Image (spheres, helix red, strand yellow):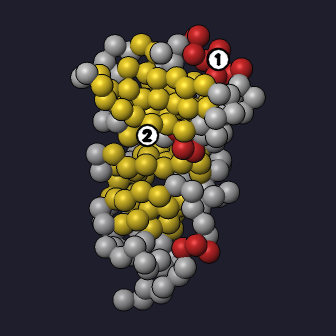
Amino acid sequence: LGRIAVRHDRFGADRVSYFDGYIVLNRPGTQQFYVSGLLDGATYAGLDFASAESSPDLLVSLAVERRELLLLGTRSGEVWFDAWTADFPFAPIAGTAFPYGCAAAHSLRALGQFYWLGTDQHGARLVLALDGYQPKRVSTHAIEYALNGYSRVDDAVGWTYTEEGHTFYCLSFPTGNATWCYDVATQLWH
């Protein structure tokens, strides 16, 4: 009742995820994300949106893992859950906001926990994993030295693979002509 079909391409999106029957999309250049109708990826109501407001920065990326939605801005992040409320289905989990942002929208990957190319409060680049609800630095000083030397990192793409029982989170930098991979089991980079 009361749902109006709204063209989601009117807003655009560069990150899309699926969460408990909803398609979740970011609205580039804003703090907002919006959702489809329940089990109806073709219907979007004009008021079915929310803002990541723990910090006044732009929403860069989003992903779902273990029935939780991670929203990453340029300088902050926060975790939401499906609250099953009538007006808007999702709500932030209290106490999960943190002061680390995302330097590359497509670096965010879920691998049991979230991994991404982040930025700290001073703008330095580092690789982070969400440990519980707090980011944990997984990059070394040597990796960070390389990352901070690249002229451009917003085009970085994260991906994962498993080989011989080891799971890896990798970051490819097209402009920097480099790829770095992190072995989750040994916590070593190559």
**Picture layout, residue 106 above or below residue 189:** below
Location of residue 120 (image quadrant): top right
Q: Looking at numbered disc 1 in the image, what kind of residue is underneath it?
A: Ala
Q: Looking at numbered disc 2 in the image, what kind of residue is underneath it?
A: Arg
**Picture layout, residue 43 above or below residue 129:** below
Residue 88 location (% of width, % of height):
41, 69
Question: Which sits in the foreground, 123 or 178?
Answer: 178
Numbered mark located on residue 109 in the image: 2
Quadrant of image for the N terminus = bottom left
Q: Label 1 belongs to which residue?
A: 146
The answer to which of marks 1 and 2 sits earlier in the sequence is 2
Q: Residue at the location (59% across, 51% down)?
A: 59
Question: Which sits in the foreground, 155 or 55?
Answer: 155
Q: CA distance from mark 1 to mark 2?
A: 21 Å
Residue 90 location (% of width, % of height):
39, 61
Q: Residue at the location (38% across, 49% down)?
A: 64
The reply to whether discs 1 and 2 touch (Cβ–Cβ < 8 Å) is no
Question: Which sits in the foreground, 118 or 187?
Answer: 187
